[in-house]
Image (cartoon, grey):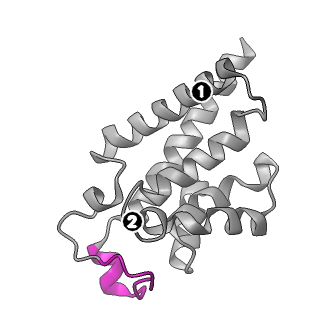
Amino acid sequence: MSQKSEKAKELFKSGYNCSQSVLGVFAEELGLDFETAMKISSSFGGGMGRMREVCGTVSGMFMAAGLAFATASDSATEKGEHYKRIQELAKKFKEKNGSIICRELLQGVETSNSPTPSERNETYYKKRPCIELVGDSVEIFEQYLLEQKSVEVK
């Protein structure tokens, strides 16, 4: 387990949502201050506002990828290259966890779409895989960054 993965899990345990926890550990090295990163990623917890859609950890990873690799260009070619990267990251997460959809990842866990976050307590952490998913997304993106740096060096 990497230091970033551990830090992301600490952020999650301290009350940040899953998306914030992932983006938060990469933000400053990718040129975004922590507070702004927390605001940007705040809407994506619980599968986008607790609607149980795309897992917030995956959304956080995608935001980090945008900071690391995307351009502000309107070029279809550049967009296509970036979307390919996003699909690759999604595939890696799905291979490890079976899905990128929050409700599917939480299958068998009683959940609610209520906008009120669940209380974070010992039972919450025992029943839900979220903290491990936070770690998985961070590790997948860390590995991806290392692979990309080795490709760029050649």
Does the stretch in magenta take in 123?
yes
- The answer to whether 35 is drawn above or below residue 93 in the figure is below
> Quick one: label 2 or label 1, which is nearer the N terminus?
2
Q: Is residue 81 above or below residue 107?
A: above
Tell me the mark number nearer the camera, choosing from 2 and 1. Answer: 2
* Residue at mark 1: 147
Let me know if residue 31 appears in the view: yes
- Residue visible at 78% across and 29% down in the picture: 73
Look at label 2 and name its amino acid: Cys
Image quarter in which the C terminus is found: top right
Query: How many numbered tags mark residues here?
Result: 2
- Residue 96 image offset from top left, x and y in percent: 33, 42
Nearer to me, 79 or 119 = 79
Percent position of residue 29, x then y: 78, 49
Q: Is residue 43 rendered to the left or right of residue 130?
A: right
Q: Are marks 2 and 1 in contact (CB under 8 Å)?
A: no
Q: Examine the rendering and report whether any part of residue 1 can be seen.
A: no
Q: Amino acid at mark 1?
A: Glu
Instruction: In this rendered view, identify the residue nearer to me: 124 or 154.
Output: 124
Q: Pointer 2: residues within 10 angstroms few (<14), some, or many (20+)? A: many
Q: Secondary structure at mark 1?
A: helix
Residue drawn at 71 percent across, 39 percent down: 68
Residue numbers of the magenta segment: 112-127
**Residue nearest the viewer, comparing 55 with 129:** 55
Category of crowding for the residue at label 1, using alpha-carbon neighbours closer than 10 angstroms: few (below 14), some (14–19), many (at least 20):
few
Give the residue pinned by disc 2.
130
